[in-house]
């Protein structure tokens, strides 16, 4: 286990993933019934952007730090991230009911609330600390909702456990993420966002993820699943897409973001999310927010692009 997320926290890929996570959680908050967030590869939950690892790569500079100006205007409004719903509580609401900057607003509020998590005496509102996916999820929960966060690396697992110690709404685990996925499904609430965000240290992580998804859907077919993957050479993703298309019968979409046009097969050129059971209006919300992300995130040649499409093999 060599991968350490501290080197990459807050980079362009984290921003895209975490904006989608916020929107998926918010979609479940349209109904009062409880849900849970399941994070199989959770990381340590909070990262220091002024720490050695983050400074060594500087990746947050082209990620969350490049968005600070955009995010600040929402933080100034000071709305509680744990409350509110981004549209009327009806499935028949017109798509125009969705505020155009909803994704950014939710993300800004989650970052603000996460920076204040368990530091009430001196909430750190500076962009120095960046929350990982479990902390972002946690601050968006209502009292009836739950978080299950799993992380295998001993050091990060200990930090995660400490972050959520004695929090009655969170449970942390420190086992293999693929085993954890089987162990926690189906959730008792029968409503969940499941984030699967492995480190891609193994060459077979993509087919493994597709297999794990197929098994997870047998246990829990109606969850919202978010499966993150890196994109170097886009052509290498074809077998993964074919594998999904052959096994997944649920509505499924693919969000992909490329942060520059000059594509080198040995470089991280972008990232993708496979979204199973995408919530109502997610496409509208992404159509609204992705142009802003594309304009501000590390688009080294100013030629960032994104796509949102139904899954096709
Ligand atoms: N989801 C986190 C976020 O968005 O803030 C980032 C997670 S990072 C991409 C992947 C994490 O998986 C790393 O923290 C790594 O230590 C952990 N990991 C590696 N192998 C694992 C395994 N077999 N089971 C669970 N976690 C694992």
Image (spheres, rainbow, N blue to C red):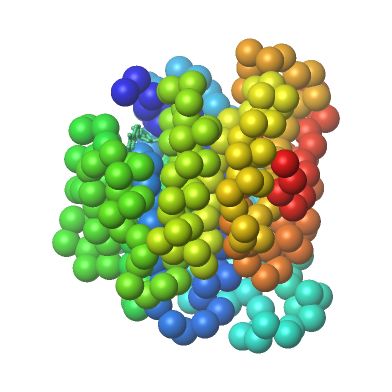
Residue 112 at what x, y percent from top left?
47, 57
Give the vertical position of 64 relative to 222 (above or below).
above
Give the residue displayed 53% in from the left and 23% down from the top: 58
Give the vertical position of 214 relative to 141 (above or below).
above
Residue 201 at what x, y percent from top left?
43, 23
Report if residue 72 is visible in the image.
no
Report if residue 178 is visible in the image.
yes
Left/right of residue 96 with respect to residue 203 in the rendered view: right
Give the residue displayed 46% in from the left and 35% down from the top: 208
Residue 55 at what x, y percent from top left?
45, 22
Residue 249 at what x, y percent from top left?
62, 58
From the viewer's side, name the closer residue of 29 and 59: 29
Dividing the image into 4 quarters, which one contains the N terminus?
top left
Direction front: furthest residue: 246
Left/right of residue 10 with respect to residue 47 in the rendered view: right
Give the residue displayed 58% in from the left and 31% down from the top: 230
């Amino acid at each position: 286990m060599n991968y350490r997320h501290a080197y990459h926290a807050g980079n362009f890929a984290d921003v895209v993933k975490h904006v989608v996570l916020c929107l998926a959680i918010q979609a479940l908050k349209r109904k009062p019934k409880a849900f849970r967030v399941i994070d199989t590869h959770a990381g340590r939950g909070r990262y220091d952007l002024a720490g050695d690892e983050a400074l060594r790569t500087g990746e947050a500079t082209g990620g969350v730090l490049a968005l600070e100006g955009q995010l600040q205007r929402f933080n100034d409004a000071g709305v509680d991230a744990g409350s509110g719903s981004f549209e009327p509580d009806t499935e028949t609401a017109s798509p125009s009911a969705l505020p155009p900057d909803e994704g950014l607003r939710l993300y800004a509020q989650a970052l603000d609330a996460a920076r204040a998590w368990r530091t009430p005496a001196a909430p750190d509102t500076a962009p120095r600390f960046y929350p990982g996916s479990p902390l972002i999820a946690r601050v968006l929960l209502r009292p009836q909702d739950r978080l299950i966060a799993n992380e295998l690396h001993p050091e990060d697992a200990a930090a995660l456990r400490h972050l959520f110690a004695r929090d009655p709404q969170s449970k942390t685990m420190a086992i293999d993420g693929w085993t954890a996925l089987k162990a926690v499904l189906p959730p008792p609430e029968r409503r969940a966002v499941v984030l699967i965000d492995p480190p891609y240290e193994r060459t077979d992580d993509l087919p493994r993820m597709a297999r794990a998804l197929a098994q997870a859907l047998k246990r829990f077919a109606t969850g919202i699943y978010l499966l993150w993957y890196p994109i170097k050479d886009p052509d290498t993703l074809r077998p993964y897409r074919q594998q999904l298309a052959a096994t997944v019968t649920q509505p499924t979409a693919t969000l992909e973001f490329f942060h520059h046009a000059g594509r080198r097969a040995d470089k991280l050129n972008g990232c993708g999310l496979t979204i199973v059971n995408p919530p109502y209006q997610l496409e509208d919300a992404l159509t609204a927010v992705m142009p802003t992300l594309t304009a501000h995130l590390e688009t080294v040649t100013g030629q960032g692009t994104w796509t949102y499409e139904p899954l096709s093999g």
